[in-house]
Amino acid sequence: MVDHVATAEIEVNASAGKVWEALTDPDQIQRYMFGSRVETDWEPGGPIVWRGEYEGKEYEDHGTIVEIEPKRHLEVTHFSPLSGKEDVPANYHTLSYTIDERGEQTRISLSQDNNATEEEAEHARLNWEKMLIGLKEVVEGG
């Protein structure tokens, strides 16, 4: 099977510390991630749950914290029951955030693997681009 990876990235006019805080603070996450409320202990191996409403449907997505390196890298698995797929490991995505501070700016790159088609990857990329634009607005706007 060919893995279609969705990738999105953005430059933020803020420190890696401010970006990291936005990626891990549930109140800030809710402001830019489509109203999603996140619950986790941010410990490797620990669960992560996203709750909210998307396109008129309530959801409760879930996964696991895979790797966490403050101000540099965050990797989690993600499964959405709204996908209509069976809740088995083969249907989970891995979301990988990389944070690269460059002087006064910080680049955030996000990739999502395990997309079945190029179209699915493109849909994911567009969603993640919207989310990253929202994150940039939250971080830069205070």
Image: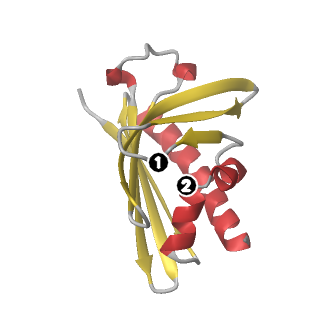
Please determine whether, in this image, residue 72 is positioned above or below residue 13.
above
Q: Amino acid at mark 2?
A: Thr
Q: Secondary structure at mark 2?
A: helix
Q: Name the residue nearer the viewer: 134 or 70.
A: 70
- Determine the image quadrant of residue 89: top left
- Determine the image quadrant of residue 22: bottom right
Q: Horizontal and vertical percent for residue 15? A: 53, 77
| Image quarter hosting the C terminus | bottom right
- Viewed as shown, does residue 140 lie left or right of 77? right
Please determine whether, in this image, residue 2 is positioned above or below residue 103.
above
Q: Secondary structure at mark 1?
A: loop
Q: Residue at x 46, y 86 (%)?
A: 103
Q: Residue at x 55, y 55 (%)?
A: 24
Q: Horizontal and vertical percent for residue 81? A: 54, 20
Q: Amino acid at mark 1?
A: Trp
Q: Dot 1, crowdedness within 10 Å: few (<14), some or many (≥20)?
A: some
Q: CA distance from mark 2 to mark 1?
A: 8 Å
| Image quarter hosting the N terminus | top left
Residue 24, label in figure = 2
- Viewed as shown, does residue 123 lie left or right of 88? right
Q: Horizontal and vertical percent for residue 141? A: 73, 71
Furthest residue toward bottom: 103
Q: Earlier in the sequence, mark 2 or mark 1?
A: 2
Residue 67, label in figure = none
- Viewed as shown, does residue 61 lie left or right of 44? right
Q: Please give the residue where the numbered disc 1 appears in the rendered image.
A: 42
Q: Residue at x 54, y 48 (%)?
A: 128
Q: Name the residue nearer the viewer: 84 or 3.
A: 84
Q: Dot 2, crowdedness within 10 Å: few (<14), some or many (≥20)?
A: some
